Amino acid sequence: MTLSARAADRGEGPPLAVVTGGSSGIGAAIARRLARRGWQLVLVARGEERLAEVASEVGAEHEVCDVADRGEVERVAAAVRERHPAIRLLVNNAGIAGHGGGFLDLEPEQIEQLVRINYLGSVWCLRAFMPALEAGAPSDLVNIASVAGTIAAGHSGPYSASKHAQLAFSRSVGVEVAGSGITVHTVIPGLIDTPGFPNRSRFRSRALKRLVAEPELVAEQVARAVERKRLEQFVPHWYRPAAIVQAAAPGLLARAARASAVRRKRK
Ligand SMILES: NC(=O)c1ccc[n+]([C@@H]2O[C@H](COP(=O)([O-])OP(=O)(O)OC[C@H]3O[C@@H](n4cnc5c(N)ncnc54)[C@H](OP(=O)(O)O)[C@@H]3O)[C@@H](O)[C@H]2O)c1
């Protein structure tokens, strides 16, 4: 039974979910899926035009907010709480790409932005919405991390580091808030084709293009993780072995990646 059906069974109204980054890609797909399943939604992002468009499509409320700005997040969470004292689901999805840039390629401001949005954004949103999640308990938090948060070998170091931090936060906070009736889920996507991460256009070969999944697959897995109380989910699931190899033999992977980088440089 879906969460919204369970709420209806108890004579409650539709459950409320807050989705950050709900105006594009994975967040918009999550919003569409949750709306179809009877959730009431508040979508959050910086750019109002796209945000208002998706919100009106799915019948959601929207709040313009930069998740990297702690003060703004607290103000918006207080405004949402005035209207909805209890929320059942927070999806920390807002994030930016590192555009394949390594430590030596990106400006210091871009590296700071990656950490502020991809990692600290999830921290500030949970802090600010925690009272409403506690009021809505049993409730759920979904953090949209990344396979780049489980594997680090090669380029995209700053993005990968921001996602490693977010993943560690997600795994550890799940234990901390367990006593408050909040279940924390970590969803770990691989290559997904979205406006912010146009992954399919990166590849020429059809076989590689096929490895890139659609945002709807992530949305489906988010809904499933919440309904089936799955704590950690790779999307697609076949990325999991790669993360296991990195964890089991980090030295081996580092040596192989380093050797290939040196070979490329010599060519
Ligand atoms: N696509 C992939 O291959 C992939 C793989 C693994 C993980 N992910 C993760 O999935 C999440 C969503 O990415 P996506 O692929 O759907 O990208 P996207 O299409 O660019 O969507 C990103 C969303 O986040 C919002 N956002 C960005 N910075 C924000 C900020 N500071 N405050 C509030 N909202 C902000 C954007 O709206 P505004 O710009 O208007 O604020 C937009 O709604 C990210 O956390 C990303 O790291 C993506």
Image (cartoon, grey):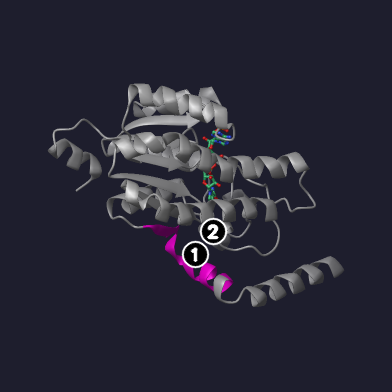
* Magenta span: 231-246
Is ligand 1 closer than 8 angstroms to the Cβ of mark 2?
A: yes
Against 29, is 202 above or below? below
How far from the left and from the top, in percent, is residue 5? 19, 41
Kind of residue indicated by mark 2: Val
Q: Which mark is residue 147?
A: 2
Please identify the quarter of the rendering in which residue 41 is found: top left
Q: Looking at the rendering, in which quadrant would you find the C terminus? A: bottom right
Tell me the crowding category of disc 1: few under 14, some 14 to 19, or many 20 or more residues within 10 angstroms, Cα based. Answer: some
Element carrying mark 1: helix
Q: Residue drawn at (18%, 32%), measured in percent from left and top?
A: 12
Q: Residue drawn at (58%, 53%), measured in percent from left and top?
A: 165
Q: Is residue 48 left or right of residue 223?
A: right
Total labels: the figure holds 2
Q: Residue drawn at (58%, 44%), measured in percent from left and top?
A: 118
Magenta: main secondary structure: helix
In the depicted view, which residue is nearer to us: 193 or 85?
Answer: 85
Residue highlighted by disc 1:
239
Q: Is residue 267 left or right of residue 228?
A: right
Query: Is 256 part of what is drawn in magenta?
Result: no
Against 153, is 42 above or below? above
Please identify the quarter of the rendering in which residue 232 is found: bottom left
Q: Is residue 1 visible?
A: yes
Please identify the quarter of the rendering in which residue 87 is found: top left
